[in-house]
Image: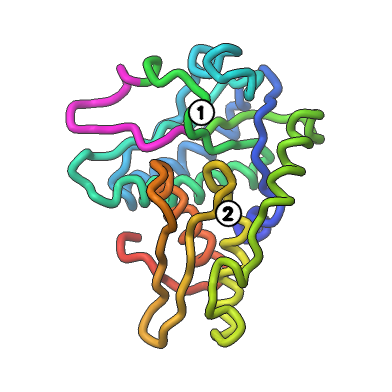
Amino acid sequence: MTLLEASDIRISRRAYIPEPISPDKKVALQTVIDSLCSRSGLRIELAENGEECFGLIKSYGMFSGVKSYFLLAGRTDDPKMHEKAGFYGEELVLEATRLGLGTCWVAGSYDKTSIADALAEGEALACVISVGEIKETENFKEKLLSGIIKTKRKSSREMSADYDTAPEWFKKGVDCAVKAPSARNKQPVFFKYTPEKVITTVNGTFSCNKIDLGIAEYHFELGSGRKITDFA
């Protein structure tokens, strides 16, 4: 399975089999994490105190069976830290998908105090992503949430006013970006085509918008085969 194929089947999973990730999958994930840390300058870790971080009350009942999660942190003096976290974090999500693992970007349904001790001086938490073994099919709650997300999803033309007149590679990029996850399913990122470069903008000031920007940019590059970011 390619990463592009993984982007077609990835869905957010919030219910996990309460078992540790298998050793061989951990090794594969760590190889990806090491590469991403080297390329991004971020600190990315596979943490295994998921029960502490995603307890029933702390996750507002939205998650179950979480054993592991990815922690993404960066330097507080890096102005693109959150955008990078979205970009490289989504690559990690799709690599996990290729391994048959479930993932979910998490905005606030977890206990941040249980993560604070893992941060070094000068670092800030960008986000966390739950990850783990999953049942083959979604449970009722996941199906309900997936149905809501699908009904809200924007079209390619809603994400780019230039879609109809742009080159085919641009259209493929936007088509892939439409499938990108985003906080509260708002899909706040817009793409503009110019002969010189692709311009990305974000609508609104929600705290997760920069992360959503990075996620959408990764999907655009994956679908189009063109580089549009200046940090990767």
Q: Does 60 appear in magenta?
A: no
Circle 2 residue: 180
How many C-alpha atoms fall within 10 Å of the one at disc 2: few (<14), some, or many (≥20)? many
Which quadrant holds residue 161?
Answer: bottom right
Task: Residue 128: give x, y in percent of width and height.
Answer: 46, 32
Which quadrant holds residue 61?
Answer: top right
Q: Residue placed at 61% from the left, 61% from the top?
A: 178
Alpha-carbon distance for marks 1 and 2?
19 Å
Circle 1 residue: 69
The residue closer to the viewer here, 197 or 226, is 197
For badge 2, the amino acid type reads: Ala
Cβ–Cβ under 8 Å for marks 1 and 2: no
State whether residue 20 appears in this view.
yes
Q: Is residue 89 above or below residue 72?
A: below
Q: Residue placed at 55% from the left, 44% from the top?
A: 93
Q: Which residues are magenta?
A: 116-128
Quarter the C terminus occupies: bottom left
Quarter the N terminus occupies: bottom right
Q: Is residue 145 left or right of residue 90?
A: right
Q: Residue placed at 61% from the left, 26% from the top?
A: 21
Q: Residue placed at 67% from the left, 17% from the top?
A: 18
Dot 1 falls on a residue whose secondary structure is strand
How many C-alpha atoms fall within 10 Å of the one at disc 1: few (<14), some, or many (≥20)? many
Task: Residue 119: give x, y in percent of width and height.
Answer: 28, 25
Task: Residue 140: give x, y in percent of width and height.
Answer: 81, 29
| Label placed on residue 231 | none
For badge 1, the amino acid type reads: Tyr
